[in-house]
Image (cartoon, rainbow, N blue to C red):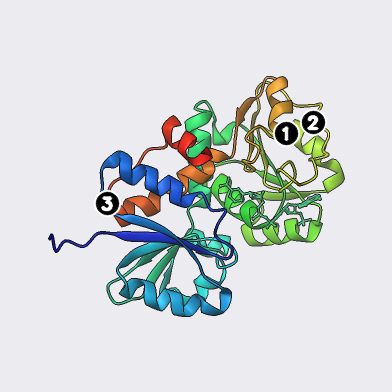
Amino acid sequence: MSSEKIPLAGVIGCPIGHSRSPQVHGYWLKELGLPGHYIPMEVRPEDLEEALRTLPKLGFAGINVTLPHKEAVLELASHVTDRASLIGAANTLIFREDGSFHADNTDGYGFIENLRQNAPGWEAAAGPAAVLGAGGAARAVVVALLDAGVPEVQIANRTKLRAERLQQDFGNRVKVVEWVHAGRMVTEAATVVNTTSLGMLGKPDLKVNLDGLRPEQVVTDIVYNPLTTPLLRAAGEAGCTVVDGLGMLLHQAVPGFERWFGAKPEVTPGLRAAALA
Ligand code: NAP
């Protein structure tokens, strides 16, 4: 029997049954012919610290982190990347030999890579971005848009205070727009992003006036269930370049996989199909 260690990684959350990460990493391991296992693990908040102490000892190279642990892991990490610190949450942990770990956030990277892959003509500098929503995912999207060079990010959120907090945290390239004026904000932007949960299966529709959508605009929704949300349908009908949210989920997994299993995987139509199966 070979004494070589088989790399282990996984995802922790509570609940965890809905996570598509095991399908994503499992697909890549098989495609690339690499040894390794990726395991979903339900970890309750009160067990988080103990789980993070134990997993490196069991041979895990790292893990993905999902709700409700994305913020709590920052307190326990020995090193937090700048982007995770700015976003205020981590989704990817790299374990070190001594049991300490490094916390990163790849959601914004996934968001931008999805745009680059599926809207190849997208240029950050083309004009302002309109962001609908100011929740946890919006923080990653706003950091990524600013980092990519978007001249201004306009944010409209039902709860204005949350949008104002983003403006305080990310500076004067961020502008807050009243939720009632979200339709006008969308009309004037070069890039439009929905980061609210509106339009998701089982949630209400996004009731923003979309009459002003124009073919020059790139419109993306980070909701991926359904793949074609009402926003994306309206944008498609208006002739906009449309990017669905599944690619963000797939691209955010790339840096962790590369680190844990030693090869950079690709986001392909085959992977999309596997993630949807
Ligand atoms: P969150 O922190 O709970 O934020 C939810 C956002 O939706 C807030 O801006 C909230 O506004 C808004 N919202 C909810 N119900 C609303 C309503 N009835 N009217 C107006 N606004 C409403 O959630 P999150 O973690 O940011 O996730 C948001 C969505 O993104 C989810 O559907 C999630 O599945 C998806 N997501 C996708 C990816 C991906 O990889 N594609 C990654 C992360 C998240 P208030 O502040 O006013 O409550």
Disc 2 to disc 3, C-alpha distance: 44 Å
Crowding around mark 1 (Cα neighbors within 10 Å: few <14, some 14 to 19, many 20+) is many
Q: Residue at x 54, y 30 (%)?
A: 122
Query: Disc 2 vs disc 3: Cβ atoms closer than 8 Å?
Result: no
Q: Is residue 79 above or below residue 259?
A: below
Crowding around mark 2 (Cα neighbors within 10 Å: few <14, some 14 to 19, many 20+) is some
Which quadrant of the figure has residue 86? bottom right
Give the side of residue 212 with respect to residue 98, left or right: right
Q: Secondary structure at mark 2?
A: loop
Q: Residue at x 44, y 65 (%)?
A: 103
Q: Kindly tell me whether mark 3's CB lies below 8 Å from ligand 1.
A: no
Query: Disc 1 vs disc 2: Cβ atoms closer than 8 Å?
Result: yes
Image coordinates of residue 53 in percent, x first then y, are: 40, 78
Q: Is residue 6 above or below residue 20?
A: below
Circle 3 residue: 262
Circle 1 residue: 231
Give the side of residue 199 with respect to residue 78, left or right: right
Residue 85 visible within the image? yes
Farthest front residue in view: 1
Between 246 and 174, the residue placed more toward the observer is 246
Whichever of callouts 1 and 2 sits on the residue coming sooner in the sequence is 2
Q: Secondary structure at mark 3?
A: loop
Residue 268 visible within the image? no
Crowding around mark 3 (Cα neighbors within 10 Å: few <14, some 14 to 19, many 20+) is few
Q: Identify the image quadrant of the N terminus.
A: bottom left
